[in-house]
Image (cartoon, coloured by chain):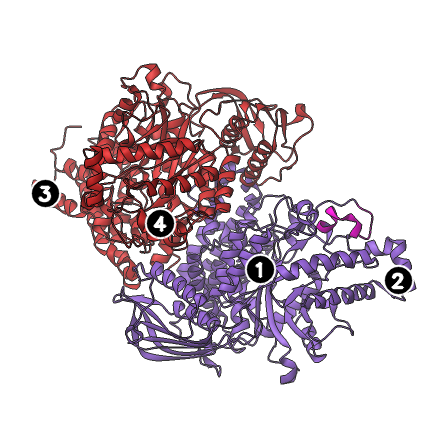
Chain colours: A purple, B red
Amino acid sequence: MKIANYLQLALLLTIASTVVSRVPAQSTATSVAPAQLSLMPVPASVQPQTGRLAISKAFTVATRGYADERLRASIARMTRRLAGRTVITLPLDLAVNESSATLVIQCERGGSAIPSLDEDESYSLEITDKQARLVAPTVVGAMRGLETFLQLVQGDRDGYYLPGIRIQDQPRFAWRGLLIDIGRHYQPPEVLKRNLDAMAAVKLNVFHWHLTEDQGFRVESKKFPKLHLMGSDGLYYSQDQVREIIAYAAERGIRVMPEFDIPGHSTSWLVGYPELGSAPGPYKIERASGIFEPALDPTRDQTYKFLDGFLGEMAKLFPDAYMHIGGDENEGKQWDRNPRIQAFMKEKSIKDNHALQAYFNQRVLKILQKHGKKMIGWEEILHPDLPKDAVIHSWRGPASLAEAAKKGYNGILSAGYYIDLIFPASQHYLADPLPADSSLTPDEAKHVLGGEATMWGEWVSPETIDSRIWPRTAAIAERLWSPRTVTDIDDMYRRLAVVSRQLEELGLTHERNYHVLLRRLANNDNTDTLRTLVSVVEPVKEYRRNQMRPQTMLSPLTGLVDAARPDSEEARQFAAMVEGFLSSAPRFQLYRSDIRNSLRSWRDAGVALDPMIDRAPALQEARPLAKNLADVGTAGLEAIEYLSTGIAASPQWRDAQLSKLDEAAKPKAALELVVIPSVRKLVIAAAEPPKPG
Amino acid sequence: MKIANYLQLALLLTIASTVVSRVPAQSTATSVAPAQLSLMPVPASVQPQTGRLAISKAFTVATRGYADERLRASIARMTRRLAGRTVITLPLDLAVNESSATLVIQCERGGSAIPSLDEDESYSLEITDKQARLVAPTVVGAMRGLETFLQLVQGDRDGYYLPGIRIQDQPRFAWRGLLIDIGRHYQPPEVLKRNLDAMAAVKLNVFHWHLTEDQGFRVESKKFPKLHLMGSDGLYYSQDQVREIIAYAAERGIRVMPEFDIPGHSTSWLVGYPELGSAPGPYKIERASGIFEPALDPTRDQTYKFLDGFLGEMAKLFPDAYMHIGGDENEGKQWDRNPRIQAFMKEKSIKDNHALQAYFNQRVLKILQKHGKKMIGWEEILHPDLPKDAVIHSWRGPASLAEAAKKGYNGILSAGYYIDLIFPASQHYLADPLPADSSLTPDEAKHVLGGEATMWGEWVSPETIDSRIWPRTAAIAERLWSPRTVTDIDDMYRRLAVVSRQLEELGLTHERNYHVLLRRLANNDNTDTLRTLVSVVEPVKEYRRNQMRPQTMLSPLTGLVDAARPDSEEARQFAAMVEGFLSSAPRFQLYRSDIRNSLRSWRDAGVALDPMIDRAPALQEARPLAKNLADVGTAGLEAIEYLSTGIAASPQWRDAQLSKLDEAAKPKAALELVVIPSVRKLVIAAAEPPKPG
């Protein structure tokens, strides 16, 4: 579900309503980790204790009670990561003697054989200077606790250790997902695997595998091989690979829910099977981004016979209880133009395309039920006949989710979690499936199962996708796991930086590939100057990228817009410094030299980039940005000069600077300079009459 | 084959004999690319022409004559890389109209169905301002030419282009390989795939897959499943994965030659099949590095029956004409202690273990012949009965290779190409399988087929292995492809830096993971100070790492020694600056301020690292190095001061500094400061009486 305007509105409203309620986590009712800890998601309850547990080469793990292969593999993975981080050789074998083990893990049972929505993921972790004890009803709970254990590792002159602590933890929501759209751009299995590892690290538990799109049909069908053979450019997952991914996810307590988006978003189905379409075809794989007309023909029994065969095959392949049928963005244009479909609607008294799609959904629902699956779809599927075990996937926001809940439907939220729209983590972080002001009764509130971050695939390659998912999705993972009251944005960013580095252990490339892209663009190993620019720009938000810089699915994703990050740390820090500086009136000394250094580096980089751009044509689109950056730096430096000397700038100066900043604020190359609001503040302040000290 | 002393000697002799013959490439008989080109390997003949061929979105490729799926896939891969580098959307479809195509590729035939030693890899490439024409007898030749085409891409204010040029090219040697030992540390298929891509980029054509070791048996055997199930910790390649790697390599014109190292290096075989051993067992997977006693029992028919079954199975799986049987480092200790084996030797008049191994090899040879394979083994297999189609793999050096050639045996060289020994690229670069002073007749010289870089796997993980192979192996690839006279080390390093960046396009991680390792060690995103230290150290050479810093195969490979690179660019540049500075006596101005800046950064980093090390216990082993670095910086700064003022330092000062440098030169944490020789020169010069100006 990707309709832009509605979503943006929902997202912005969500943000507007929550941004004012920023409450430091420390002041809430829930125990929250003290500042020196960097747990993410924050556990339900954290009680620091005295003492510390040293990590040495004598580190061992023992299990107690239930233990199985999945638990042992989890322990081995944790041990390997601990060894990698501490550079200590740790034994791979489990300890025989529980009393001397460094970490004792006690489980009651394995948990669901197939990861399930009902899984008990709770755990408790107690660390003393003698031992760590992790207790969980299920192996999945133990896995969640092992991630917390790893996040607790710290170091000082005396070595690595874990602080004394008592943690009791369980998720706020049972459904905490990440959708990856591999329809528009295929991602090889290793990309999915490393992202599953990252999901597990931040306690996400649903991989929503968006497998079919206008631009690609990415799963092997043995029954209907023309689906993947003609609809994927050869870029699809074999059923063996699908099973491998499902097993990999299950090993980490992660459900794998497939989505087969119908009746719209189905061009790639129709390349091999045009007879399923609502227009005669022929069809070819779509290369553009946007909403396209092709839709399955909902009036012919042959369509349902095909879906019965195909979805039946997929129901066997994917063990999850749920199957997502999409259902979004079908505008019905093919239906409008097809006389046979029009006649069918008349005959059956189907009044419009929405009702026709409801008819389609009803028949698909029966197919899913026949194959033992529960249906989930984007909120368009909501209809009086929909059985109550279907799940509504909301893209409009918490309000529509609440409405469905009042009708008795379970639902999950993705509005606010559209990570492809390039909003900063802070915005996603504050979108809550069940906000404080929710009107739901406690029983109704139980229908709100959680949410999913959505990595739509228009502009992501295997090289860049991690940087679009991480680290921001860790903030969403915290929203879905941690108590509602955990909303301190500054603290979130502090911890996010730590988690981001830890994700690199798992092979995630969000940080390392940033430099690779810049080196390639600059055709040079020294990218310092280029980084000065790129660190203060962000890609344009929402769906504006393609308007400003049109591309197809065949275009390279190696430009400056692909290297730039969604969430400029430099801009955030600069903004904080400017706030501090302005609040230090009338002497204006706080952060003054840091601010000056930043402004100078922008002014100088703007000039120094020119020769690099001359040698690197792919950077030519950045030339106006470089000039803007120099202007912004200069304006800021002049403002600082006025403020430091206590002489008010003239209104003419101010207006000239503001107009320069307005020009600089216009996106170029689908990038925007995100430090301008802060510099604007400096310029405006510089022209205000000085206040007496 | 890994015996250290002999090899080091051979390597050092090779270097000593060739380092004096450094001749600028430009002055050789062969046409060499002009300085602005960065081709690697340098083609056999390059003639610059006027004009340039622009790369725009109108870029198209047409084929002429023979074309097949492999060629089309190669063109598609080239186009994708070109698009990625230029950030231009390029069409994927081939041009219909040859005359308007940007690049026309003309092949005569596909080349061997299975990549073969006899493949014709030659090509010619002509670029004018209208068109590029790539002509090759085979598709493999065209692939080699496409890599050259990509290396020719340049950019300036007017955009991306290829310079006008005429290239005629073919390899000097037909066998240009890279051995990867995945026995000691397993590497997942994606690591092998990206390294195959990198091999193709520098025109290597043999992937020598070292599949079995004391520490791991890494290939699935359906006949003898206990081999991989009990001998690999679960880390092995399924036969499907093997086929996938072979196909991936074949797509790139690369042979895949498996090695099953016998009779020694076989502990992992014996875990599941102890009855094959020369001692009763039981056996377990070896975790240490070194040479171990277990060896197959060469006296029992059962051994050969087993090998017939196993090697027969592998002969079907691996289509290459050659099978490598290792044969190295069997010291025969198990044989000495086994009375039955001793009795067998007596009975058959086998005089020593070497003769017993020859007997073993003869029987293995018959098995290979039965299964249609030619034998290759380390040079120990050389024996009067060895048939002439066997290949000798030399680890002693060009002399022993020449000796084998005189006897009529084909051979390949790996002495000098042991990239695991952490020598700089310049040393490997000058090792030549057929040196200028070779005593071989032209006919004998034909027996020298080429060489292989050997990535032995003691200390490489998937995270670090690329940094041990690349970029240095590109220099070896050039040695094996380019004319013998191409030996300019400075020019090699200049081009190596460019090729290194291009390898990142293919997903190689040698550069990106360097920063990842440092961020993790520092537990901080800012690693500037740490990089100042690490950029001027190198891991200790040869096999000293494990003596200084003992580890097992289960140890993490995430320490500073794993992050440090084999070939410090900073040290190389510093050495060149010091040469220039000292040659600018008596004024000593050349590079003075650059040298001072470097020395100051070392002095300061040495101090600034302390608090970082306090927070990052994994860095504690670097504390003495940090102090040494500060001392080196201070000594150098004082020397510069003396030289600049023209006052000679006292012998006491000099001796005190030299003794400090001696102390600093001692390796710590298995690392050595490689800038010390240059600073030593400064210190000595500072105490010399000033010469009149």
Residue type, numbered disc 4: Gly
Q: Nearer the viewer, mark 4 or mark 1?
A: 4
The quarter of the picture where the N terminus of chain A appears is: bottom right
Q: Are marks 3 and 4 on the same chain?
A: yes
Q: Are marks 4 and 1 on the same chain?
A: no
Residue type, numbered disc 3: Asp
- CA gap, disc 4 and disc 1: 76 Å
Residue type, numbered disc 2: Met
10 Å crowding of disc 3: few (<14), some (14-19), many (20+) = some
- CA gap, disc 3 and disc 4: 51 Å
Residue placed under numbered mark 3 in the picture = B655
Q: Which residues are magenta?
A: A268-281
10 Å crowding of disc 2: few (<14), some (14-19), many (20+) = some
Picture quarter containing residue A674?
bottom right
Tell me residue B475's x, y (percent).
37, 32
The quarter of the picture where the C terminus of chain A appears is: bottom left
Tell me residue A553's x, y (percent).
64, 46
Q: Nearer the viewer, mark 1 or mark 3?
A: 3
- Magenta-span inclusion, residue A387: no
Mark 1 vs 2, N-terminal side: 2
Q: Nearer the viewer, mark 1 or mark 2?
A: 2
Residue placed under numbered mark 4 in the picture = B216
For residue B237, above or below residue B20: below
Mark 3 vs 4, N-terminal side: 4
Residue placed under numbered mark 2 in the picture = A345
